Image (cartoon, rainbow, N blue to C red):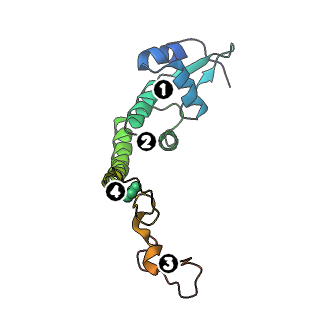
Amino acid sequence: MASLAPDADVLTIGELSERSGVPASALRFYERQGLLRSHRTSGNQRRYPRATLRQVAFIRASQSVGIPLSDIGAVLGFLPDDAEPTQEFWERASACWKDMLNTRIKRLERMRDLFTDCIGCGCLSFDQCALINPGDKLGRHGPGPRRLVNDYAPIADDAG
Ligand code: FES
């Protein structure tokens, strides 16, 4: 890989850290995870294209709503090399993630409601506690190893 002379089109890790407010250690971590790319000087110092600043903003905004780094990296992988996430790119990603967040929020609300039943209970019972055995689907087939008995036939929503 060709080394780059210091110029206005690239940022050192210190400059990127200062401009973004993200610690250099986190920037190096993002790079190890494949979310950011740098070029190396002949002295093996990192140089980031200017577009990296918006990539870092994209990562931080996504992380702030709980998007896993692996998902963020997968989406950033659609960007051409050294391209910055445009406004449209962020709009599309955030719209997609909004649906995922709404699904996660609904699941958490359901778990919170089930958890409320546990407060003050302490039974931790596989038979009674819906958190431990949500829905008890096989329990509707009767006692014992239901999948192993000859008359087992799934009920319509067993898979859900
Ligand atoms: S601990 Fe008893 S219902 Fe969950």
Q: Amino acid at mark 4?
A: Leu
| 1 vs 4, front mark | 4
Q: Which mark is residue 114?
A: 4
Q: Secondary structure at mark 1?
A: helix
Name the element at disc 4.
Answer: helix
In which quadrant of the rendered view does residue 91 lie? top left
Q: Of the residues shown, which amino acid type is indicated by label 3?
A: Pro
Residue that carries the numbered disc 2 in the rendered image:
67
Residue annotated with mark 3: 143
Depth check, mark 2 against mark 4: the one in front is 4
Q: Earlier in the sequence, mark 3 or mark 2?
A: 2
Percent across and percent down for residue 49 are: 52, 23
For label 4, being within 8 Å of ligand 1 is answered yes
Residue 65 to residue 20: above or below: below
Which mark is first along the chain, 4 or 3? 4
Badge 1 or badge 3: first in the primary sequence: 1
